[in-house]
């Protein structure tokens, strides 16, 4: 087995009660890490992860994020997984300002506040690894979900690429990377991936004609978090989507 060097490391996973977040928590636990599992509403889901330290916070609220990091204690790494995909398909000409602002707040603002909280701890400790989770919507766009695509694109590119240059000012070996999952079998997307016609359509844009599992995504998060495996990798966007392209290839 390849050694990740994560044993004994204290790692915060946001959105740990969700599909990808819970898979990340399980993978980190399997590596012997100490996991701080964040949730907002689903406490039962976070507590069901096993031996984790559970912390609640609304990541769109600055004071709650500050409290989250105070309760989390000294951290070695953070996987900022939490995010929300608005299910209704609404083109921009029908998209309300209310939904636009809410989607950006639940995805981009929440990730910014999480990243800021973690990087403040990096400033104190002098080391750290941050992995942001965006989406293929931010790489290829997503018709009917321009709000979500815009938020995830900002995370994957503007935020990730800025943070990787900023963090080394206070911690020369600290790293920031991003994972962009494509269609994944999570509770958030269950209604869509249970529809064979939807799956047939989306997999026509992928070399590997299958929907990802949460573990597929989580293992890439682990690899990027690990200084042993990715110690010279920073500012990278890893797309976990079976070779998806922005066009039909089958």
Image: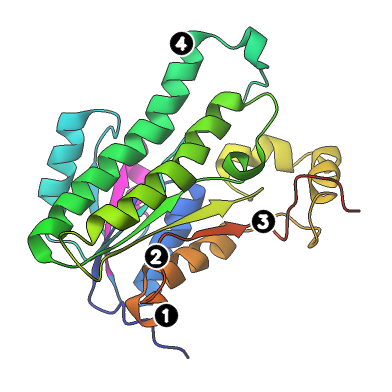
- Viewer-proximal residue among 66 and 166: 166
Please give the count of numbered marks on the rendered protein: 4
> Mark 1 or mark 3: which comes first in sequence?
1
Q: Residues within 10 Å of mark 1 (few under 14, many from 20)?
A: some
Q: State the residue position of label 1.
A: 229
Decide: few, some or many residues near mark 3? Use Cα within 10 Å; few <14, some 14-19, many ≥20. Answer: many
Task: Give me the disc on residue 98.
Answer: 4
Identify the mark nearer the N-term, 4 or 3: 4
Observer-nearest of 47 and 102: 102
* Residue 73 visible, this angle: no
> Which one is closest to the eye, mark 2 or mark 3?
2
Rendered residue at 64%/49% (across/down): 182
Q: CA distance from mark 1 to mark 3?
A: 21 Å
For the record, the magenta segment spans 34-48
Residue sitting nearer the eye, 241 or 40: 241
Indicate whether residue 41 is drawn in magenta: yes
Comes first in the chain, label 1 or label 2: 1
- Give the foreground label among 2 and 4: 2
Q: CA distance from mark 4 to mark 3?
A: 30 Å
Between the C-alphas of marks 4 and 1, the distance is 42 Å
Tag 3's secondary structure? loop
Residue at the disc numbered 2:
234
Question: Picture coordinates of residue 155 (x, y %)?
Answer: 44, 42
Residue identified by numbered label 3: 241
Is 221 inside the magenta-drawn segment?
no
Quarter of the image for residue 26 reads: bottom left
Earlier in the chain: of badge 4 and badge 1, it is 4
Instruction: Report the disc number at residue 179.
Output: none
């Amino acid at each position: 087995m390849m050694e990740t060097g994560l044993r004994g490391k204290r790692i915060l996973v946001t959105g740990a009660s969700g599909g990808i977040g819970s898979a990340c928590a399980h993978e980190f636990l399997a590596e012997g890490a100490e996991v701080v599992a964040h949730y907002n509403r689903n406490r039962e889901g976070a507590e069901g992860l096993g031996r984790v330290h559970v912390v609640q916070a609304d990541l769109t609220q600055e004071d709650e994020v500050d409290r989250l990091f105070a309760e989390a204690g000294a951290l070695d790494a953070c996987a900022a997984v939490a995010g929300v995909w608005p299910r209704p398909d609404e083109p921009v000409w029908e998209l309300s300002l209310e939904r636009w602002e809410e989607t950006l707040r639940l995805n981009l603002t929440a990730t910014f506040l999480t990243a800021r909280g973690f990087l403040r701890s990096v400033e104190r400790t002098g080391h750290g690894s941050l992995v942001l989770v965006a989406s293929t919507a931010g790489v290829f766009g997503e018709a009917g979900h321009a709000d979500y695509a815009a938020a995830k694109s900002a995370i994957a590119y503007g935020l990730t690429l800025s943070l990787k240059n900023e963090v080394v000012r206070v911690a020369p070996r600290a790293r920031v990377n991003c994972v962009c999952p494509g269609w994944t079998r999570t509770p958030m997307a269950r209604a869509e991936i249970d529809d064979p016609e939807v799956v047939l359509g989306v997999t026509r844009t992928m070399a590997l004609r299958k929907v990802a599992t949460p573990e597929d995504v989580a293992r890439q998060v682990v690899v990027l978090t690990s200084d042993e495996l990715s110690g010279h990798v920073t500012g990278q966007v890893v797309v976990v989507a079976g070779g998806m392209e922005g066009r039909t290839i089958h």
